Image: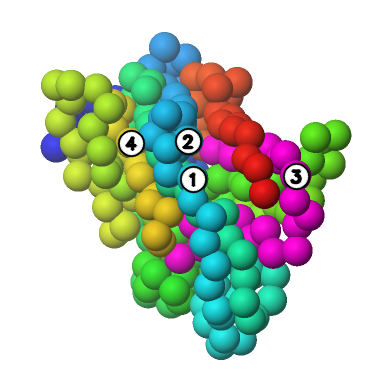
Amino acid sequence: MSCGRIASVGWLGLAALAVFAGCGDSIHPPDAAELPDLQFVAGQMTSSLLFDDFDFRDTDCEVVEHCVGAPGHRFLLRFDTVSANRGTADIFVGVPPPPGESNDVFEWSPCHKHHHVRNYASYELADATGVVLTARKQSFCLQDTQAVQPGIASSDYSCMRQGITHGWADVYDRELPCQWIDVTGVPPGAYTLRIVVNPLRTLPESNYDNNEFSVSVQL
């Protein structure tokens, strides 16, 4: 485990912040210079865009969890979501409740069979006038998937102990369930896919102004 600083999140309405040393039990006051900073890896996300179609049954988890508008044949815009922690402290969300249980921070996913951090990202598709045609919140299991800064060891975050080490990224691959926007019935034309990480700002960060990714798409 790396010995960096950790931003520990507690939900009390929104977020209460305590910053812990990575090696030891001492508690330090919040320091804006030592906080996580979530940013998207834009090039990797842009290159992942893919249109796909799929048939869903009304009992499928993707229908139950409202990842598609209805059962049946659906047209999907798939993409990777790659959120890197480029700050100076880890994001440490914590250990989820027992399987099958949810709380204010974590929700149990019957599709993935593990817990996700609630409302970690928002996805929306807007037309040329800015009118949003489809949108939804997406929950994530936060873990170290990909190194983005050399020389920083992973703190071994996983779905059982969730967080993102500073210098690492969480990657949600486009092949995962619900890693898409349902564009069934959207008229042909030019649109903007907009993704925002930490949209409710419940996770402490040094900068919330770099949390958005947008790309033009043609249907």
Residue at disc 3, secondary structure = loop
Quick one: label 2, few (<14), some, or many (20+) residues within 10 Å? some
Q: In this view, does 2 lie to the left or right of 194?
A: left
Q: Quadrant of the N terminus?
A: top left
Residue 83 makes an appearance in the image: no
**Front of the two marks 4 and 1:** 1
Task: Out of 208 and 3, give the one closest to the viewer.
Answer: 208
Q: As rendered, which of 212 and 11 lies closer to the eye?
A: 212
Does residue 172 appear anywhere in the picture?
A: yes
Marks 3 and 4 close (CB-CB < 8 Å): no
**Tally of marks:** 4
Q: Position of residue 213 (x, y in %)?
A: 56, 31
Region in magenta: 177-199
- Magenta stretch contains residue 10: no
Q: Which amino acid does label 2 sit on?
A: Thr
Query: First in sequence: mark 2 or mark 3?
Result: 2
Q: What element carries label 4?
A: strand
> Mark 1: which secondary structure?
loop
Residue at the (78%, 54%) spot, across then down: 187
Specify which label sits upstream in the sequence, 3 or 4. Answer: 4
In the displayed structure, would residue 162 be above or below residue 41? below
Residue 1 numbered mark, or none: none
Residue pointed to by mark 4: 169
User: Where residue 97 appears, x then y in whole percent?
Assistant: 40, 66
Relative vertical location of residue 49 with respect to residue 30 in this rendering, above or below: below
Judging by the rendered image, the residue that carries numbered circle 1 is 49
Three-letter amino acid code of the residue under disc 3: Gly
Q: Distance between the residues labelled 2 and 1?
A: 6 Å
Q: Do the residues labelled 2 and 1 touch (CB within 8 Å)?
A: yes
Labels 1 and 3: the sequence-earlier one: 1
The Cα–Cα distance between marks 4 and 2, rounded to whole angstroms, is: 16 Å
Q: Say which residue label 3 marks.
A: 189
